[in-house]
Image (tube, grey):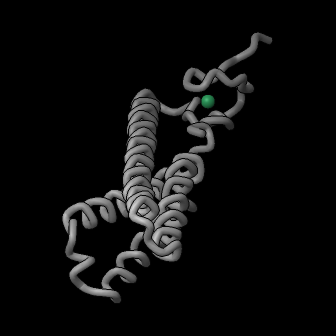
């Protein structure tokens, strides 16, 4: 008996299978069912690509946020400010950069943490003086939006991968 392969994922399959056990391709389905399956698979792949693109944008935004904090710390050090004032920015900036670095690897965890930290930081600024929050307000809104969007896309990605193990 010759070996059979799934036309979609090239896994070997037995003659009697109704659908591929690896990718769920409808082996005994009609041409239309097969076409629908392929179409859905292409759309799922592009959604996963979108999630990756969004995670990379989040990483860059977190690097920029962290970079600004480190710059603040540096200004504090160069001006001989009290250590307590620049240590805060030094630690905060480093955390954002580490979260940025890790965000494409474990997006749900690190984008969530970064978003919580960022919103917490903005709440802290607001508690000191509402004026601090309105400085660079557009950039703050843009960065929070990008993080939230990246989180939504990553949730969608996880859902798709759960339903289609083959896409991993
Ligand atoms: Zn298959």
Between residue 98 and residue 104, name the one nearer to us.
98
Residue 54 position (above or below residue 133): above
Q: Is residue 112 visible?
A: no
Q: In the image, what residue occupies the spot 66% across and 19% down?
A: 5
Q: In the image, what residue occupies the spot 19% across and 64% down?
A: 138
Between residue 26 and residue 150, name the one nearer to us.
150
Q: In the image, what residue occupies the spot 60% across and 39% down?
A: 168
Q: Is residue 12 left or right of residue 40?
A: right
- Residue 31: name its quadrant: top left
Q: Is residue 102 left or right of residue 126?
A: right
Q: Position of residue 62 (x, y in %)?
A: 42, 55
Q: Which residue reaches farthest top?
A: 2
**Image quarter hosting the N terminus:** top right
**Quarter of the displayed picture in which ligand 1 can be seen:** top right
Residue 125 position (above or below residue 67): below
Residue 84 position (above or below residue 144): below
Residue 97 position (above or below residue 20): below
Q: Which residue reaches farthest right?
A: 1
Q: Position of residue 59 (x, y in %)?
A: 44, 49
């Amino acid at each position: 008996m010759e070996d059979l392969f799934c036309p979609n994922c090239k896994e070997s399959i037995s003659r009697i299978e109704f659908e591929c056990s690896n990718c769920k391709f409808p082996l005994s389905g009609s041409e239309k069912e097969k076409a629908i399956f392929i179409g859905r698979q292409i759309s799922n792949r592009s959604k996963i690509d979108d999630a990756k693109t969004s995670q990379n944008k989040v990483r860059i935004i977190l690097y920029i946020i962290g970079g600004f904090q480190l710059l603040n710390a540096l200004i504090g050090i160069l001006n001989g400010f009290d250590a307590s004032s620049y240590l805060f920015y030094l630690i905060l900036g480093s955390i954002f950069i580490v979260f940025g670095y890790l965000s494409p690897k474990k997006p749900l965890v690190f984008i969530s943490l970064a978003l919580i930290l960022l919103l917490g930081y903005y709440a802290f600024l607001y508690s000191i003086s509402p004026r601090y929050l309105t400085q660079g307000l557009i950039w703050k809104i843009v960065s929070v939006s990008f993080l939230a969007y990246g989180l939504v896309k990553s949730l969608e990605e996880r859902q798709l991968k759960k339903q289609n193990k083959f896409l991993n």
